[in-house]
Amino acid sequence: MNKTYTIKEVAEHFSLPISTIRYYDKKGLLPFVSKNSSGYREFTESDLSMIYTICCLKNTGMQIREIKKYIELCMVGPQTINARLDILSRHKTQVLARQIQLEESLKEVNNKIERYSSPQANRIIEQQIKLTKRQKLSSNLEDKFKHL
């Protein structure tokens, strides 16, 4: 007999609150999960694999309704492979675009850390403030750095 897992064990395995797993079930993301004779959910290794996919899709920004659509297609069988491939390909494109944005943002964060870690940090910041003040003055805009 294959091992089954309780909702608590699954929650611990994926570092999720039990309420999240119940929420996923309520939203129709876990139609593959069976209940035992007492009415409790019992999860198999195959279920864990599907939940891992759900977590990956959620963690990469896929909306619940899209995940549900994907899971529904999985439940139909191999005739939906092309539709599943389409969903995942579109999602991958979106994830890669966000990854590029994150990399650009991380560069800026690293630039700021490098600047603030520099022995000349005070001088650099003072020069930036002076430049900002000149730009505001030349554009007849209020100087928000008056206190400096």
Image (cartoon, rainbow, N blue to C red):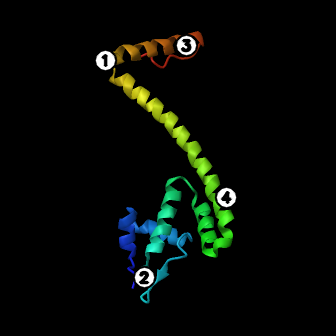
- In terms of depth relative to the viewer, which is nearer, 72 or 77? 77
- Above or below, comparing residue 69 to residue 33 in the picture: above
Contact (CB < 8 A) between labels 1 and 3?
A: no
Q: Secondary structure at mark 1?
A: loop
Disc 4 residue crowd, few under 14, some 14–19, many 20+, Cα 10 Å: few
Structural crowding at the residue carrying mark 1, measured as other residues with C-alpha within 10 Å and reported as few (<14), some (14–19) or many (≥20): few
Q: Alpha-carbon neighbours of circle 3 within 10 Å: few (<14), some, or many (≥20)?
A: few
The CA distance from mark 2 to mark 3 is: 66 Å
Whichever of callouts 4 and 3 sits on the residue coming sooner in the sequence is: 4
Amino acid beneath label 2: Tyr
Going from N to C along the chain, the mark reached first, 1 or 2, is 2
Label 1 or label 4, whichever lies nearer to me, is 4
Is residue 148 among what the camera can see? Answer: no
Q: Residue drawn 47% across and 68% down?
A: 49
- Residue 86 marker: 4
**Rendered image: mark on residue 119:** 1
* Residue that numbered label 2 is attached to: 40
103 left or right, relative to 76: left
The disc, 2 or 4, on the residue closer to the chain's N-terminal end is 2
Which corner quadrant of the image does residue 6 belong to? bottom left
Q: List x then y, in percent, for residue 50.
A: 50, 68
Q: Which residue type does callout 3 highlight?
A: Gln
Q: Label 3 belongs to which residue? A: 135
Residue at image location 45% in from the left, 65% down from the top: 20
| Residue in the picture at 39% in, 67% down | 11
Disc 1 and disc 4: Cα gap in Å?
52 Å
Residue 15 lies left or right of residue 108; in this view the side is left
Farthest residue to the bottom: give it. 37
Q: The disc labelled 4 sits on which kind of residue?
A: Asp
> Quarter of the image containing the C terminus?
top left
Q: Secondary structure at mark 3?
A: helix
